Amino acid sequence: MIDLSIIIVSWNVADLLKACLHSIYASPLGSYMLEVIVVDSASSDASTAMVRSHFPQVKLLEQSDNLGFTRCNNIGLEIALGRYLFLLNPDTEIVDDALAQIIAYMDEHPRVGIIGPHTKNTDGSTQSTRRRFPSLAVGFTESTWLQPFAPKSLLDHFYATDVDDHSVSEVDWVQGSALMARREVYTQIGGLDEGYVMYSEEMDWCKRAKNAGWGVVYYGKASIIHHGGKSSEQVAARKHIHFQTSKLRYFRKFHGWLPAQLLRLFLLISYLWQLGVEALKGLLGHKRALRQERVRAYWQVVRSGLRVN
């Protein structure tokens, strides 16, 4: 019987994926049985050749098109056999026996449906990966130009800053760079919502799990390293569009159509404002190449209309 299925969606990060897979197979598992599934989203680098050459035990699912992070995770989930289903980014590395620790905790706590480990940045500092569900006020302030003016308590609550880095604590959701779910959760609520191409899909999944009565836990005793956003960094404008449309989809789904439309209008006006500021700075000759790049990215966002599927 397979205890743990690790599902990795990869796109053009061959070296990071290699380090990730090495760390998985070096992690002591004791008697637990493991399978690793790599869903390659039409990489143009040497990712698939590397997996076939160095990790023949991996189940490699090569896609002919870039289907997006969420769809590719669901493709992996559909064939996974494990009691636990671990969504893991390719730019991560498992630290020591983190996998065995998390499985043991889940076995001991049957009402916990989803769990996320202590995540560290490349330099060893803690990466904030546990959250509470966002209020509408958070939607208008977090990751917008209003963030510096938001009440500290508002964002502290959202970022769960009261949760100690090394604690084991109930939270609302954990970041999808390293998220383990119990098979029963997947069976009950289904996979990720493919209306989210990337971003917020894990928040949605955790929301549905909690609504179904499952607990979500941040497990600070086990660690991974997350080098951070290497696939999404490759397409700046699309990153903005996916981030904001995913936010809007979440608010439409759980807060209603009108709040989501108000938030959409606010975001579009914000991007127009930023575009004007960057264009003006470029005309004045301040870091002109950078300003031009930002103007192009923000204009693509505005042209998209931030329309939600």
Image (tube, rainbow, N blue to C red):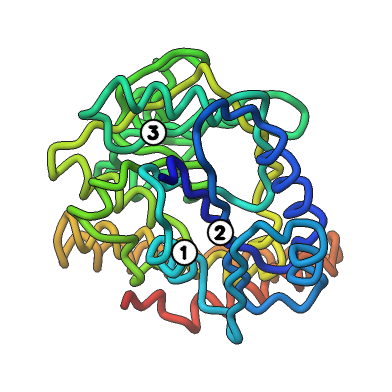
Residue 130 seen in this snapshot: yes
Contact, mark 2 vs mark 1 (Cβ under 8 Å): yes
Q: What distance separates the C-alpha of mark 2 from that of mark 3? A: 19 Å
> What separation in Å lies between label 2 and label 1 (alpha carbons)?
6 Å
Quadrant of the snapshot with the N terminus = top left
Q: What residue does disc 3 label?
A: 115
Work out whether 216 lies above or below 248: above
Question: Could you tell me if residue 272 is visible in this image?
Answer: no
Q: Earlier in the sequence, mark 2 or mark 1?
A: 2
Say which element carries label 1.
Answer: helix
Q: Amino acid at mark 2?
A: Ile
Image coordinates of residue 248 in percent, x first then y, are: 32, 63
Residue 56, picture quadrant: bottom right
Residue located at (71% from left, 56% from top) = 230
The alpha-carbon separation of the residues under discs 3 and 1 comes to 19 Å
Q: Please, what is the three-letter code of the amino acid marked with disc 1? A: Gly
Q: Residue at x 84, y 67 (%)?
A: 288
Is 20 on the left-hand or right-hand side of 288? left
In the rendering, at what x and y percent does residue 223 appear?
A: 59, 26
Report the residue marked by disc 1. 76
Q: In the rendered image, which quarter contains the C terminus?
A: bottom left
Marks 3 and 1 close (CB-CB < 8 Å): no
Check residue 37 in the rendering and tell me which mark sits there, or answer none: 2
Q: Nearer the viewer, residue 58 or 111?
A: 58
